[in-house]
Image (spheres, rainbow, N blue to C red):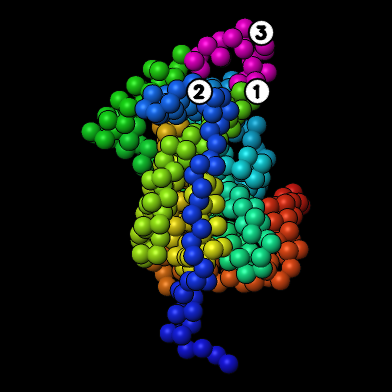
Amino acid sequence: MSLDNSTERKILHAPLHDAPLVEEDTTSIKRPGLMDQLPFTGRTRKVVEWFSVVFAVYILITAVSIIGSGFGTATGGSAEEVFAFAQNPVIGLVIGIFATVLTQSSSTTTSIVVGMVAGGLPLETAIPILMGANVGTTMTSTLVSLGAAGDRNQFRRAFTAASVHDMYNLLSVAIFFPLEWAFGILDRVSTWFAGATTGSDGGIIATIFTAMGSAVTAVTDPGADLVEAGLLAIMPPVWAGIAMIVLGVAGILLVIKFISSMLKVLLVGNVEKMFHNAIGRGPISGIISGLIITVMVQSSSTTTSLAVPLAASGKFSIWQIYPFTVGANVGTTMTAMIAAFGFSGSAATAAMTAAAVHLFYNIFSAVVIFSLPFLRPIPVIGATWLGNLGAKNKLYVVAWLAGLFVVLPGIIIGLSALI
């Protein structure tokens, strides 16, 4: 029996279940590391915690700057030859997926790429890696959905909500990867944006951005220069550069996790309130709330994972969660934009260009997919199908994770090597 369009739409947009919302127990959220042992209370503790976040952002920018310097030192200005293996855009896409799966943070991957572009990595090599980062980050929310595996209906809703992020990002890549390969749209737009914000001919906007960048680098450069000088004093340039890259990556991994954890603690009440008030009020509201919350907590993984338990409870439908995850994709680009301010001169323009690629890729994806009625439902249809399969047998979930994040990238790399 077939349904008419209006009936089908009502079913798709209806809440998946009418169970009451399970509120998050904010008292169970733990502060990272030593922050949980602070001898302060009340307002003093809040001030110290906010200061720790500011300091962590300083470390983040410094770490990205160290990667840029280290990459330039290690490659000796020959980054294009060193990364010749990644000039195939398909290989770059797979590298972005693998890197983000390993770090469980697209912000980490994009920040590293920003530093490498500032150090000489060609932009055309970096663009597919940045696209792949969007796909790799979806694994976190899928893992979160496994927490509802004890109840088939709840797991179906949770896995469907997590999978819509996968399906949306795969659709984005399917649209923009070939377009970029053929026409260089993101390359052109991002190069223009970087020139307008950091170049010498960008007018008042470039002046403001340049002044901001100069102020940031004046604070962060001494730390990066100290690390570089210390390593060059005891190692040959190539090894010193590699050591700088390793230190920078380690620093980014640590501070991204710290910043996300601390902001979740500091803003959890506001985030929860915004989340509950915005979701379900239409796609625009959902996208904006996902964007704002992700900027606030500096982690799209945290934002999308927050939505999964609410979908599992049945309070919100997949159509209500869907725009929220799209907004999270756009919001996560802010980390790379912040990281780009760790450079000056031509390196600043290169870094901003890479950051702008991630920004415009996610903006264009949201506009195109949500503006075209025949594209908009595809992620929901795919996620619903996958959620139903996963509810029948958990082996489908294992197969999906392994296939998307391991087998498929491996096959792509193998085929690319043969061609």
Q: CA distance from mark 2 to mark 1?
A: 36 Å
Evaluate if marks 2 and 1 touch, with contact meaning CB atoms under 8 Å apart.
Answer: no
Query: Does the segment drawn in magenta span residue 199?
Result: no
Q: Is residue 90 visible?
A: no
389 sits left or right of 6 in the view:
right
Q: CA distance from mark 3 to mark 1?
A: 13 Å
Q: Is residue 187 left or right of residue 73?
A: left
Q: Earlier in the sequence, mark 3 or mark 2?
A: 2
Q: Earlier in the sequence, mark 2 or mark 1?
A: 2
Residue depicted at x 61% and y 65%:
154
Residue underneath mark 3: 234
Q: Residues within 10 Å of mark 3 (few under 14, many from 20)?
A: few
User: Dividing the image into 4 quarters, which one contains the N terminus?
Assistant: bottom right
The amino acid type found where label 3 is placed reads Ile
- SS at mark 2 in the image: loop
Residue 22 location, x and y as percent? 51, 58
Q: Which residues are magenta?
A: 223-245
Depth check, front residue: 51 or 72? 51
Instruction: Give residue 242's mark.
Output: 1
Can you tell which mark lies on residue 401? Answer: none
Q: Is residue 225 magenta?
A: yes
Q: Which residue is mark 2?
A: 38
- Please name whichever residue, 28 or 247, is drawn nearer the observer in this view of the structure: 28
Observer able to see residue 389? yes
First of labels 3, 1 by sequence position:
3
Amino acid type indicated by mark 1: Ile
Residue at 32% over, 27% down: 212
Eyeballing the image, is 55 above or below 273? above
Q: Is residue 231 above or below residue 208?
A: above
